[in-house]
Amino acid sequence: MSAIVSVTNVSKIYKLGKTEVPALRGVSLEIDQGEFLSVAGPSGSGKTTLLNLVGCVDTPTSGSVVVDGKDTTALSERALTSLRLDSIGFIFQSFNLVAVLSVFQNVEFPLLLQGRLGKKERADRVNGLLEAVGLGDHARHRPSELSGGQRQRVAVARALVGRPKLVLADEPTANLDSQTGANIIDLMRDMNRKDGTTFLFSTHDQKVLSHANAVIRIADGQLLGRETVARAG
């Protein structure tokens, strides 16, 4: 099985005035295509920083991050944008929905940027995902008319709509009740099984951890180890 992500001796240092704050310290990690992987650790351990580096949202201070065969540290901004659009789906804690767009339009947006599907194909895919996340009757609502949990579900649908090779999720069930969270995880596992989509989560949720095929433990910016776990379902 080939690695879709390869992180090699990566460090990330943030500067706050004259103070240097190390977020990651010499992290190396390989993620094979088709894995359903959780990153676990206390707040401030470096989980979100790791996701941002893998997702080409940030760049390492040193070391290399290779995603889908491309060394992200050597790519132009345009090439990074193309890699994010074509290969990566994001589920952010802060949702990052566009306030002036409807739920349907927010989910459709990545497909418009990709420019590969016709209007009917886009509508079918968007509506299918909205049904899958339990928001089929909210397509015309604006984000401001939704609860936090509903906005999280829109963010999940938007991340999955382009059928990316890799989905990165920062606490994907943090704003959801237990039943909705379980439904979202089931949807992702289904996509993982059927399409071979790779998932990398940052999470405190034991239910999410229990569905992973492996758990990466991280603390104080350092990788503590990788634990293989029995896959549920």
Image: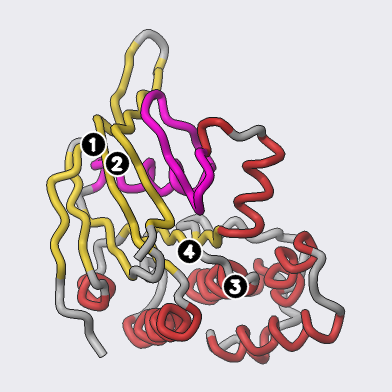
Q: Image point 53% across, 85% down: which residue?
A: 133
Which residue lies under the disc numbered 4? 167
> Disc 3 marks which amino acid?
Arg
Q: With respect to residue 90, does 225 lie above or below?
A: above
| Separation of marks 2 and 3 at Cα, in angstroms | 27 Å
Secondary structure of residue under mark 1? loop
Asked if marks 2 and 1 touch (Cβ < 8 Å), the reply is yes
Asked if marks 1 and 3 touch (Cβ < 8 Å), the reply is no
* Residue 227 drawn at (x, y percent): 13, 62
User: Is residue 57 one of those drawn in magenta?
Assistant: yes
Tell me: 199 left or right of 162.
Answer: left
> Disc 2 marks which amino acid?
Gly
Q: Image point 58% across, 59% down: which residue?
A: 87
Q: Closest to the observer: 43 or 108?
A: 108
Q: Quadrant of residue 161?
A: bottom right
Q: Image point 29% across, 26% down: which residue?
A: 22
Tell me: 121 left or right of 208.
Answer: right
Which residue lies under the disc numbered 1? 221
Q: Which mark is first along the chain, 1 or 2?
A: 2
| Separation of marks 2 and 1 at Cα, in angstroms | 5 Å
| Separation of marks 1 and 3 at Cα, in angstroms | 31 Å
Which residue lies under the disc numbered 2? 46
